[in-house]
């Protein structure tokens, strides 16, 4: 006789590589969601004229650096931004498109957090 739950444990195959990839996907999805939210907020502040030219320059460099780091992390784990874009069923995809909204383009639609 087996203990309750042992049948499920026997069927569950945990490969270290798949666990690592799954965890990396989850963490990078959260980081990408936050990156996109920060980028949208930064664009709103720029469009609203709240920042000096120097602040805009620093912000742009910081966001580009963060985007480069995300790309490198995705490459390291063999992921694409599409892998991070969870399908939330009727709500649509979690993330908007990989390209950020630009002035003159809508930031509403294309994903749960916005997009184009």
Image: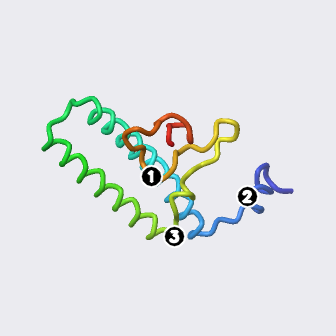
Mark pair 2, 1: CA separation: 41 Å
- The residue depicted at 23 percent of the width and 53 percent of the height is 61
- The residue depicted at 34 percent of the width and 35 percent of the height is 41
**Which residue was labeled with disc 2?**
9
Q: State the image coordinates of residue 87 (x, y, percent, origin top left).
A: 64, 46
**Mark 2 or 1 closer to N-term?**
2
Q: Secondary structure at mark 1?
A: loop
The residue closer to the viewer here, 30 or 9, is: 30
**Mark 3 or 1 closer to N-term?**
3
**Which residue was labeled with disc 1?**
99
Position of residue 69 in the picture relative to residue 82 (left or right)? left
Q: Secondary structure at mark 3?
A: loop
**Which residue was labeled with disc 3?**
78
Position of residue 94 in the picture relative to residue 43 (left or right)? right
**Mark 2 or 3 closer to N-term?**
2
Kindly report which numbered mark, 2 or 3, lies closer to the viewer in this rendering: 3
Kindly report which numbered mark, 3 or 1, lies closer to the viewer in this rendering: 1
- The residue depicted at 52 percent of the width and 63 percent of the height is 80
Query: Local crowd at mark 2 within 10 Å, few (<14), some, or many (≥20)?
Result: few
Above/below status of 29 relative to 105: below
Above/below status of 31 relative to 113: below
């Amino acid at each position: 006789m087996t203990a309750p739950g042992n049948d499920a444990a026997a069927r569950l195959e945990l490969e270290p590589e798949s666990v690592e990839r799954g965890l990396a996907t989850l963490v990078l999805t959260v980081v990408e969601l936050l990156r996109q939210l920060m980028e949208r907020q930064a664009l709103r502040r720029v469009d609203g004229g709240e920042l000096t030219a120097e602040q805009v320059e620093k912000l742009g460099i910081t966001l580009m650096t963060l985007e480069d780091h995300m790309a490198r992390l995705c490459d390291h784990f063999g992921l694409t931004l599409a892998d991070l874009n969870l399908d939330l069923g009727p709500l649509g995809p979690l993330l908007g498109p990989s390209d950020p909204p630009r002035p003159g383009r809508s930031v509403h639609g294309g994903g749960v957090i916005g997009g184009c």
